[in-house]
Amino acid sequence: MNFDKEAFKTSIRTRLKRNYGKHLEEANKHDIYDAVSASVMEYIQTNWMATRKTYEEKPCRQMYYLSAEFLMGRALSNNLINFGIMKEVKEVLDELNFDYTSIEEEEPDAGLGNGGLGRLAACFLDSLATLDYPGHGYGIRYQYGMFEQRIENGYQVEYPDNWLKHRDPWEVKRSDLAVKVIFGGTPTAKNVSGGHVAFRIEGGEVITATPYDVPVVGFDTKTVNRLRLWEASSDDGFDLQLFNDMHYNRAVERQNSAENISRVLYPNDSGPSGKALRLKQQYFFSSASLQDLLAKYKRDHGEDLSKFAEYNVIQLNDTHPVVAIPELMRLLIDEHYMGWDDAWAVVTKTFAYTNHTILAEALEKWPIDIFQGLLPRIYQIVEEINRRFVTQLREKFPEDWQRQNRMSIIAEGKIHMAWLAIVGSFSVNGVAALHTELLKGVELKDWYELFPAKFNNKTNGVTQRRWLASANPKLSAFITKKIGHGWEKDLSQLKKLEKYADDDATLDEFMAIKRENKVELARYLKETQNVFIDPDSIFDVQIKRLHEYKRQLLNILHVMYLYRRILEDPTYQCAPRTFIFGAKAASGYRRAKSIIKLINAVGDRVNNDHRVKGKLRVVFLENYRVSLAEKIFPASDVSEQISTAGKEASGTGNMKFMINGAVTVGTLDGANIEIVEEAGEENAFIFGLTAEEIQAIESGHKYNPQEYLARNPGLASVLNQLVDGSLGADTAGIFRELYESLVFGIEGQRPDVYYVLADFGAYAEAHERLEQAYRDQRRWAKMAFLNVARSGKFSSDRTIEDYVRDIWKLEKVVVK
Ligand code: 26Q
């Protein structure tokens, strides 16, 4: 595009005057961020309108990604890169005497997600727009996103993330498209001609859903798709009578109750909370989104909805939006007077479901009383779906009562949302090869036997525009110098780098870039968190949500093990290492919080012990989030992907490390398997029990962690430090709990549920191999370099092409 610098400057000045009544000279950094963003938005709008017009002129099949989470992070850099005006805007700011980096830092992260699942949704939107597919997001405009984490006295403390404190320059409020969503009330049969039975809801709480649209800018294309986020409010929420009678709180009760629905993201990435408000959130955005789609369909095609599924496909991001299945039935039957069978035919051609977890405790089940109280009509419909489904099951497995019970959508007082998802969708997919195989063979075995054709795998990916082009400009320039442009939209081109894998000059340059990125991260951490790290040490990094199955505990126990070794043998020679952690724990997850405290306690101990002499450092970075991740991946040497085999559905951080040239230490879990398959086993450090071995142990009930302690005195001694008070007296209690959970099992659990002790020896040994490899700098450089060259598969562009081909069946629509 032709970018007029002077016009852009004028635009910035105009906005400063209009929005803040300020001259350029009076503007602070935030004002500039806002004015620049608003000016960029002006350009985006042109393409956005053109895209909308293109989609409208010739109605085409479109995909809608329904997700309770979109972890978008910051928009400015991404939009400038995708729009192709980064260089120009930087120059403009330079000329106005502002530094781009510090302006960029003014933008709060849009942290509307917990972790992997939410960030995957964001990467998918980027790829869809870049590849010119008509695919859009629907979600919730949480007023407060993922909490801000501070570490106080080594403990995690949560603070609200008031990301909308200033206005968000990237959103457009569409009050004209607001819809109503009803909770509670009484379903009442109404008379409809033609013999159909339809219901209306009498009474109930009426919530207004107002959409805010955020543009999703494709890279090097005119396509701008849409993320539509719903905000909850009440139209008659303020009672003036009560206010006049000085009942100030009661006067706004209804307003608050409505607004609470989109108030805050549940900071829980691993399990149903069972809270009514969470179900309200799910129904709220599912219903609003479907009403929006039906209204559009009727504008384009008239009242006959029988062909709805030809033009719309809805991807359900885990079970969180699965209530959309009965809701679409309700809308078709009660509001559009379709018969059950016709409606069901539409529904089961519209929905596709992605599963993101095999942790049994994470599968959503809603207690009937909560569900029926909030959604009485939807409950009736779920009952009818289940009645018909169970009838079908009986025909297929007449005598198999157990199977019928296991598969009933409603059982033991609960509604099983994953079962509802499978029954109501035409596709069910896992997110990495192993994960899908485990779904088919174990977790969803009954379902695979019933509906084999629905099951398919879609290995996750990440967008190289954000995670390489934007996050790592130095490596990007280097890549482009070597192989030219093209990788930005076709990551498989990175394989052209392979021919330099034995070229010393290339490897030196590659490693020099890694070092510059390490220096830059060290500088940033010193400035923002007053944390010191040494760029001459190995940056060994584990950044992800804190969860027992991800085994941050294995990592920190190994650090304690190394520390002990250094103290026991002062002559012990090793490459200096910095172990970097970043992780948020769900607010109510006590054990995860204890692990954070342990990491910090070990850090205090190790970092302040002069005997360690720089050989070892442990840092826990506060408030891990997308914008911090963008600074860490490019500076990492080692990627810790050490989940218990079979537990991590895919992982996506593992891919971000790989494309930035970090070497994986990992188990054969999730997408790690595919990562080493691509990189070559010799270019990763794989260790530990396989999923199959763990299955065998579990079916034989023969795991005794004490055996591992008996065999490894070093490990026993490390574990002992958890309970001998050496990590600080105040923590004896919580570390004892960690100890006992590993060694004996507490609270009715098996000991060491996640096989930390079973894998410890192999993990320590993998680290020894790693250290050996690192000492040979050239060998290390080649390993890291080949990881980059072979990371092409892990672009979300590839993932999206897989979804398009197998599930969505979209055509590209090029905006002129
Ligand atoms: C459910 C009910 C109530 C409250 C919260 C939740 C909830 C919220 C978020 C449950 C799960 C999540 C998020 C799960 C998640 O992020 N899963 C990850 O998805 C990634 C993308 O597919 C995978 O790469 C990871 O392996 C998987 O852990």
Image: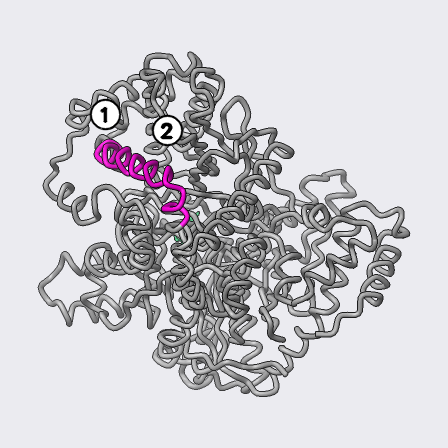
Seen in the image, is 134 located left or right of residue 16? left
Give how far across and how far down residue 494 sits, in percent.
Answer: 44, 64
Q: Is residue 532 left or right of residue 269?
A: right
Left or right: residue 330 compared with residue 446: right
Between circles 1 and 2, the one closer to the viewer is: 2
Could you say which is closer to the camera, residue 807 or residue 203? 807
Magenta span covers which residues?
Answer: 756-781
Q: Specify the quadrant of the image occupied by residue 80.
A: bottom right
* In contact (CB < 8 Å): disc 1 and disc 2: no
User: Alpha carbon of mark 1 to alpha carbon of mark 2: how far?
Assistant: 30 Å
Q: Measuring 61% from the left and 87% from the top, which residue is drawn there?
A: 57
Task: Label 2, secondary structure: give it.
Answer: loop
Name the N-terminal-most of marks 1 and 2. 2
The residue wearing badge 2 is 574
Q: Callout 1: helix, strand or loop?
A: helix
Which quadrant of the figure has residue 517?
top right
Residue 595 seen from this side: yes
x, y percentage for residue 717? 27, 18
Say which mark, if any, is on residue 377: none
The residue that mark 1 highlights is: 743
Say which amino acid is labelled 1. Val
For this rendering, which residue is in front, 95 or 444? Answer: 95
Q: Quadrant of residue 75?
A: bottom right
12 inside magenta stretch:
no
Q: Nearer the viewer, residue 417 or 682?
A: 682
Which residue is at a point 70% across and 74% down the rendered structure image?
Answer: 1
Q: Is residue 206 above or below residue 737?
A: below
Q: Magenta residues: mostly which secondary structure?
A: helix
